[in-house]
Image (spheres, rainbow, N blue to C red):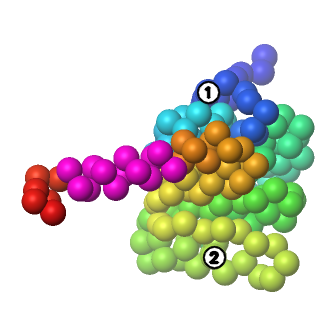
């Protein structure tokens, strides 16, 4: 019996969905941050746990079928050697946002370099170490290029963010 994805959030829309992949269950917190911000923006997403090293054939099947299921952007989250984002990018021309995870000998610097230093020809957009929220926002921004309503929600979120800083009690009188 096939199980539903770990997390399939929001309703499908013509605007496309985001495929979030973590290399291990231990990375799931960053995936939840990405999924939460996408949820907030009304962007459907699904989260999968697929190691590029330990389950390469499953990963290839997921990537090959993703576009047909409406995925338009990937978020790939991994630590240590962190090949997951690059391996996904090698199998699709859809945009891939990589999230390096802390840990390892350099507490995430190793994963950051592994993800950001892709050789020419196969790009991966990279966000900060452990920054699932920014990965979600960047994926939404990519989808918003062809979705004016999503773009308006992103703009509104920025305005709210700025207003919250202005409303901080430390800023009274400014
Ligand atoms: C990577 O190795 C995963 O992305 C994770 O960040 C790291 C450790 O994996 P586990 O040993 O916790 O499964 O493949």
Q: Say few, some or many: other residues with alpha carbon within 10 Å of mark 1 (under 14 / 14 to 19 / 20 or more).
A: some
Q: Residue furthest top?
A: 1
Mark number, residue 116: 2
- Residue 5 picture quarter: top right
Q: Is residue 100 above or below residue 163?
A: below
Locate the N terminus and report the quarter of the image it occupies: top right
Q: Is residue 2 above or below residue 134?
A: above
Left or right relative to 152: residue 148:
right
Q: Which residue shows up at 44% across the image and 53% down it?
A: 158
Q: Say few, some or many: other residues with alpha carbon within 10 Å of mark 2 (under 14 / 14 to 19 / 20 or more).
A: some
Q: Is residue 148 above or below residue 158?
A: above
Q: Nearer the viewer, residue 52 or 87?
A: 87
Give whichever of discs 1 and 2 has the lower sequence position: 1
Q: Which residue shows up at 77% across the image and 21% down it?
A: 2
Does the magenta portion include 66?
no
Residue 40 x, y percent position in the rendering: 50, 36
Locate the C terminus and report the quarter of the image it occupies: bottom left
Q: Nearer the viewer, residue 39 or 79?
A: 39
Find disc 1 in the rendering and name its residue.
10
Query: Magenta span covers which residues?
Result: 155-167
Residue 115 x, y percent position in the rendering: 64, 72
SS at circle 2:
helix
Mark number, residue 156: none
Is residue 103 among the parts visible in the rendering? yes
SS at circle 1:
loop
Q: Which residue shows up at 51% across the image and 57% down it?
A: 134
Q: Which residue shows up at 63% across the image and 76% down it?
A: 116
Left or right relative to 169: residue 14:
right
Question: Mostly what secondary structure, the magenta segment?
Answer: helix
């Amino acid at each position: 019996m096939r199980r539903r994805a770990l997390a399939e959030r929001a309703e499908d829309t013509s605007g496309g969905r985001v495929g979030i992949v973590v290399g291990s269950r231990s990375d799931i917190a960053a995936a939840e941050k990405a999924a939460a911000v996408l949820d907030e923006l009304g962007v459907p997403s699904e989260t999968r746990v697929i190691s590029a090293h330990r389950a390469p054939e499953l990963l290839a099947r997921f990537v090959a079928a993703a576009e047909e299921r409406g995925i338009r952007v990937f978020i790939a989250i991994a630590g240590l050697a962190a090949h997951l984002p690059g391996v996904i990018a090698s199998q699709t021309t859809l945009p891939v946002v990589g999230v390096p995870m802390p840990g390892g000998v350099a507490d995430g610097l190793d994963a950051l370099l592994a993800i950001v230093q892709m050789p020419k020809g196969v790009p991966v957009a990279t966000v900060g170490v452990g920054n699932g929220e920014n990965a979600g926002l960047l994926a939404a921004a990519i989808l918003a290029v062809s979705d004016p309503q999503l773009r308006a929600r992103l703009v509104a979120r920025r305005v709210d963010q700025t207003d919250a800083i202005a409303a901080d009690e430390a800023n009274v009188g400014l």
